[in-house]
Amino acid sequence: MRKSGDFEYDDLQGLVRFAYGKLPETCFMLLNIADASAAKQWLSNAPISNAVSTDPLPKTALHIAFTVAGLRQLGLTDAVIESFPDEFIVGMSGDESRSRRLGDVDENAPTRWQWGGDSDNLPHVLLLLYAEKNAINNWRKTVEDSFFSTAFTLLKELPTTDFRNAEPFGFADGISQPLIDWARQQSTDAHDRDSYSNLLAIGEIVLGYPNEYSQYNPRPLFNPKTEPAAMVLPNAEDQPALKDFGRNGCYLVLRQLDQDVPGFWQFADQASDHDSDKRQQLAEVMVGRHLDGSPLVAKSKIDIPGIDSNDANNLFTYNDDPQGLKCPISAHVRRANPRTGEMTPGHSNWLTRFLKILGFCNKRPDDDLVASSRFHRLLRRGRSYGPVLSPDAALKPDAPVAERGLQFICLVANISRQFEFVQNAWVMNSKFGGIQLERDPLLGHRRQLYDGDSTNHFNRSDPTGLTQKICALPQFITVRGGGYFFMPGLRAIKYLAALPNHGSDKVS
Amino acid sequence: MKPQSTFMICAAVREGQLESLRDLLRSMNISHKKNGLVNPDNSLIPFSRFPNLHMARLVIIEATTADDIKAFGLEPKPWSPTLAFLGDIDGDRNDFFDQLVELAEQGLTQIFSFCIGFPDANSNTLKHWLQTHDVVPDANYINWLGRTVKQVHEEAALHQCLAEYLPQAVDDVRHNTTSPLSLQQQLRQSLLSYVEMQKQTGRLILTAPECTPCRWQLRNLLHKIGIPLVLLLLLPLFLLIAPIFLLRIRMLEQSDPELFIRPTREHIKQLSAQEDWYVTNQFNVFGYVKPGLVRLLTFKFILLLTNYIARHIYNHGFLTRIKTIHFARWVFLDDNQRVYFASNYDGSHESYMDDFINKVGWGLNLAFGNGIGYPRTRWLIKEGAAREHQFKYSQRRHQFPSEVWYKAYPDLTATDLARNHRIRLGLEVRQASDADISEWLSLI
Ligand code: HEM
């Protein structure tokens, strides 16, 4: 087995390995490429951060990702583009059916987005700058050298604010993340994965490595004989004669999500008869964690691979709470990661396992309705934006209205099986896990079903069987923009920077 | 119990008529769209007027992937695009055909006039023509044997009625502190008497199940015993040939050409335009059986078993680990050279694929591993679907849209139907303990 020290961290963009908690200031820029050759010149010298860990920690970081339009603009040919998956090529907003699937309808519809919703405002490049306190402006000046201003036009600067490890509703965020199995020590065979593990195959986040199916995702590969420029690229692990453009790259999903903080807390207040304890409880069961981030369910009795046994905030599954008495099935974090293994909990031998495969031996009628988590994990890297508003201030009738929310970012190796699945089958699905007519209480739109059944409910199970039904939930979160990006490995960036200029861009 | 039956009327489309037929079929849809959602009150086949019809669809089966057989060194045989009208109904098929003729003779005549052999000299009535063009599936799956459309609607109404009344019942019970009964028991009583009242005023109907037809019972019993009996008799023979057979299969698995062809974006777009409107989606795939007797026999045998277990074991809410399929069928066409699979499943396509790969990959491998284009399997059950991208490409490539699709209860999933039924059972059967009553109340 390889050691983690063997991993090519120097070819990986650091954002995959680090969340930069110590670099609170950020500047997220959506750029269009105005001059491809200047862009490539800038790219060839850009101080893009790799994933090698340093001591002391870095004081700044820079990351870059491209939409399909951006890659085209740099001169990647159609033939190469075609070896990316459809969802990346078509884009987040490029197909009505995808929008329906993601819940980007009504208020969330791409036609209403501030960016990324139609062809006029599609970015080419996403640039992410991170710096220590009060240092972002200087870092920005360094990055924006003379090539930069010729190369790019600024489509939009995405606002961000340092919320100190919380999100605008006031909940602690950034607590649960999959732990990437850099050393490839965990078996991906289904027989070894009956129960939940937080350790995740590299290929679930980074291209060019085996994923949880022990397979390599499709990505552009080059034959160095016909494409000598590809010599700078790493070899494809599964096809060593070919060069791998995807290796150490991943997809970056960005969604600008507006949060109605006064709306959220005022609704919680009104639904709990203005009782402050009940209000907080209600908000907490909608999220699925306490305000301080601690879990709603009891600590797991067994170890969970990939979670430190002292990490009280993460050492849990929902195995002992099948009805959602402690944490409602519909709660945001329970939907976003149901912490399920390959099999439902509780079998002792091969015979019961076999019977379960045949569909028998389940304890409850609603058992086994939710897919196994490991194929649907997201590595989250979002940052909040807008003026901070505490829950108490949000309750005041004159609470200041402002644009605030989350620049939601997640990194994945398969957009449709990971981000889109979570968003569609888990978050927006009104029948998730056998529940009745509820979408994610935080994230969901509230559009009714085809025949008119309303979905604006949130149900809290109770041991007496008397479910507490909270009705007429408003929509708290509205999509303001979004896009699918590819965040290449550093050698792939070198390859891009060396691409020949085509046609009109040619410097004469 | 009134068992369901199924129908699938197939006829080849006349040359040059395909597009006009498509136009006609699409005119049945809401705003003539390609999303396939039928207007249930359309004038050609007014589906809403068939009280026994669960789901139905009209599809045009085309051999879009026929050239794949060239990889095996064979030339594709001609296949004329075929119109199929299929669905799942309560009760006897012939009664349904009578209804079809009564309510949609004109529309069906108009539709089938695009087909070769319609009208045909030997069938003097439409009903007879339908009967002679009906194709029986090789395997058929019904989520819940004997659950009628009527029952689905009645039980959904019951659930809704109880859900609306429950808060008031809780209020009443909490105010009545004198009762010696527990909260749960009082609530149950209160709900029971409310339901009685609603029934008496006619606002709620809960029809008792019909008796199961004797002929059906007899035939079902014969099937239930007969198949294992025949298999038992053939067992020595099976054991004898099994080693050679397995070896041969294993060789084929290694030598069969693998196809890794990506579906076009246009095709995916066409398919997804029909998805995620209801909580349920429809699904059609069509392709070639791999050449050779070994493959065909394996496929046939697996479908025979599938049909058997679906009919006698998996007939109450789940098909192995999958609880999201309402109806499904596997049909050999064109002299057993090609196979068609159709289903109605809850949730998105991506989650259906997740179920396929992670929950029943082995079952899919057993059957579709014998189809051209399916990713390579090992010992019939291993790998196959777990070659994720090959599987997904191949699945999408062989999938095709429905022209017209009808579902009698668009907002209800199979899980909903099972829950509503449990709510009803809870009314009829007394629970043993307060905890059981709580469990029942939590369903409401
Ligand atoms: C403004 C919108 C959102 C808010 C306010 C929000 C809030 C939260 C909070 C408070 C947590 C708990 C902290 C933690 O476990 O790290 C969390 C976890 C999580 N959220 Fe969100 N979230 C939002 C959007 C999304 C979106 C769009 C997705 C994906 C489609 C998502 C996926 C997740 C996941 C996967 C987790 C971790 C769950 C776990 O592993 O237990 N979130 N979110």
Image: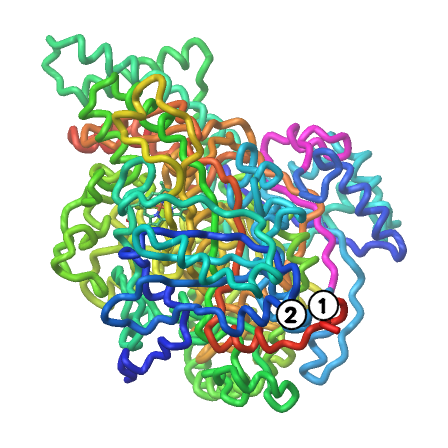
Per the image, the residue denoted by label 1 is: A505
**Residue A244, x across and y down, in percent:** 52, 79
Circle 2: residue type: Ser
Helix, strand or loop at mark 2: helix
Tell me: residue A54, above or below residue B104.
Answer: below
**Residue B317, x across and y down, in percent:** 41, 46
**Residue A291, x across and y down, in percent:** 22, 38
Tell me: residue B120, above or below residue A436.
Answer: below
Per the image, the residue denoted by label 2 is: A37
Q: Is residue A151 left or right of residue B220?
A: right
Task: Please tell me the numbered disc located at residue B113.
Answer: none
| Camera sees residue A350 | yes
Q: Quick check: marks 2 and 1 in contact, CB under 8 Å?
A: yes
Residue at x 21%, y 53% (from the top left corner): A314
Q: Say which quarter of the image contains residue B207.
A: top left
Tell me: residue B104, above or below residue A210.
Answer: above
Disc 1: CA contacts within 10 A as few (<14), some (14-19) or many (>=20): some
Q: Is residue A207 left or right of residue B56?
A: left
Instruction: Find out if the beta carbon at label 2 lies less than 8 Å from the nearest ligand 1 atom.
Output: no
**Which quarter of the figure is the N terminus of chain A placed in?**
bottom left
Going from N to C along the chain, the mark reached first, 2 or 1, is 2
Residue at x 64%, y 70% (from the top left corner): A37
**Residue B112, x across and y down, in percent:** 81, 45
Q: Is residue A425 left or right of residue A74?
A: left
Alpha carbon separation for disc pair 2 and 1: 7 Å
Q: In this view of the protein, which residue sits in the foreground, A506 or A484?
A: A506
Chain ID of residue with mark 2: A
- Taking the magenta stretch, the answer to whether it contains residue A185 is no
- The span picked out in magenta is B38-63
Circle 1: residue type: Asp
**Which quarter of the figure is the C terminus of chain A placed in?**
bottom right
- Taking the magenta stretch, the answer to whether it contains residue B55 is yes
